[in-house]
Image (cartoon, grey):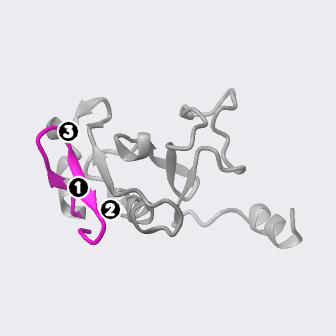
Amino acid sequence: MSPKAFLVLKNGLNEEAVYWMNACDPASMCGIKLEGLPYRLPRRILSTHLVYHGTRPVLISTKNGRELEFLVPPGSPYITGCQGFFKTLLTRDFRPVPAVRVGTVNGLPVRNSPYREALESFGYKKGYMDYSLRRGHY
């Protein structure tokens, strides 16, 4: 770890920062059993992503967005900020996904989810069985 990185950790993370990481990222603790953690971490696979607001996880996305688990209530102001990571999935230079298709949110079909309105406000379009977001529609 560089001295600069050490100072960042020593001084504490910016609690207003919104960032995301892949579950396989070296900094991710996914797949490691940790006692005392106030939330569970998902499996360490490439199609899983975690979105944080400061040190608090706010969204777990599995299967490249097919299954979402929000860790904040439906009206939370953090929801809009944490969805920006989907834009990255669609526009990144290396293997962008053609569309993010959400089938379930917190275990419910997306069409019955209290988070449906937040997805629609970000640009997701209602489909037959899912909601989808395509490049340029956000």
Q: CA distance from mark 2 to mark 1?
A: 7 Å
Depth check: 84 or 132 in front? Answer: 132
Badge 1 density bin: few <14, some 14–19, many ≥20, Cα 10 Å: some
**On the rendered image, what quadrant is the C terminus found in?**
bottom left
For label 3, the SS is: loop
Span of residues in magenta: 123-138
For label 1, the SS is: helix
Mark found first going from the N terminus, 2 or 1? 2
Which x, y percent locates residue 85? 43, 61
Which x, y percent locates residue 121? 19, 62
Q: Is residue 105 left or right of residue 111?
A: right
Question: Where is residue 98, by image quadrant?
Answer: bottom left
Is label 3 in contact with label 1 (beta carbons under 8 Å)?
A: no
Which x, y percent locates residue 111? 15, 39
Circle on res. 118: 1
Which x, y percent locates residue 53? 50, 58
